[in-house]
Image: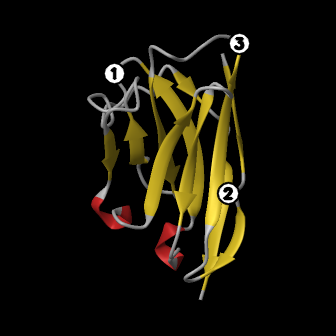
Amino acid sequence: VQLVESGGGLAQAGGSLRLSCVALGHSLDTYEMGWFRQVPGKERELVASIGRDADSAYYTNDVKGRFTISRDTAQNGMTLEMNNLQPEDTAAYHCAADPDLYRRRDSPAPPEYWGPGTQVTVSL
């Protein structure tokens, strides 16, 4: 499976961006999916994740109320709507999929599938 992200770029504080992730290869219906972000020199952080049936979602405290994750079954992928962006949201955002993504979010081992990342840069 190959994960392909799109939608990153530049935004001003208070602005919005929409990230998309499409999985190529086979269906990810049995996988949890999520977005991690990583800043050079820091550990990756799970920003948001969504269950197999989109029946549950997790958000890290910093993005609650600002970001919304959703699954796109038709595209075999997911999206992340990011509103009221702040400079501290600046990072490389990676799409990920794993049968147990949320529970393994702090594991040193990477998720089973990991996208190359898309850069989000937020300026004042």
Left or right, residue 8 beside residue 95: right
Contact between labelled residues 3 and 2, with CB atoms less than 8 Å apart: no
Q: Distance between the residues labelled 2 and 3?
A: 24 Å
Q: Determine which of the numbered discs, if any, sits on residue 25 in the image.
A: 3
Give me the residue at 50% from left, 68% from top. 89
Q: How far apart are marks 3 and 1 (CA)?
A: 20 Å
Give me the residue at 46% from left, 38% from top. 34
Q: What residue type is labelled 1?
A: Asp
Q: Determine which of the numbered discs, if any, sits on residue 119 in the image.
A: 2
The one nearer the camera, 50 or 44, is: 50
The one nearer the camera, 85 or 54, is: 54
Asked if 70 appears above or below 16 in the picture, the reply is above
Few, some or many residues within 10 Å of mark 1 (<14, 14–19, 20+): some
Q: Where is residue 2 in the image (x, y as percent from the top left)?
A: 69, 22
Assign the N terminus to one quadrant of the image: top right
Asked if 78 appears above or below 3 in the picture, the reply is below
Q: Where is residue 64 in the image (x, y as percent from the top left)?
A: 33, 62
Asked if 10 appears above or below 45 in the picture, the reply is below
Element under label 3?
loop
Q: Which amino acid does label 3 sit on?
A: Gly
User: Disc 1 designates what residue?
Assistant: 100
